Image: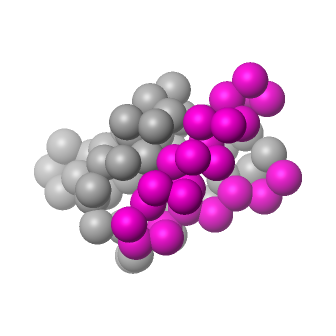
Amino acid sequence: MKIHIDEDKCVGGGQCVLAAPEVFDQRDDDGIVILLQDSPPSDLDAQVHEAALLCPALAIAVEG
């Protein structure tokens, strides 16, 4: 799995962090998403896909 973030779309809602805290975080200054792992282990697949679905700005793209 590969994860791509469109920072220009991100609204800093934090839903991704709640769904997959091992993979996503937020910048302190503006809340924009930070990708902690761009190829996380397969045991986090469900969490990553949930995070992408919950993103209000559709700023997360998951391949694989």
- Measured as percent of width and height from the top left, residue 36 is found at 52, 36
**In this rendering, would 5 be left or right of 14?**
right
Q: Nearer the viewer, residue 15 or 37?
A: 15
- Measured as percent of width and height from the top left, residue 33 is found at 38, 52
Q: Residue furthest bottom?
A: 8
**In this rendering, would 14 be left or right of 8?**
left
Q: Residue at x 64, y 48 (%)?
A: 49
Tell me if residue 57 is in the magenta stretch.
yes
**Does 23 appear above or below 43?**
below
Q: Residue furthest left?
A: 29
In this orientation, does residue 34 appear?
Answer: no
Q: Residue at x 72, y 36 (%)?
A: 45
Tell me if residue 20 is in the magenta stretch.
no
Q: Residue at x 55, y 56 (%)?
A: 52
In this orientation, does residue 17 appear?
Answer: yes
Q: Which residues are magenta?
A: 41-64
What's the image's color scheme?
one colour
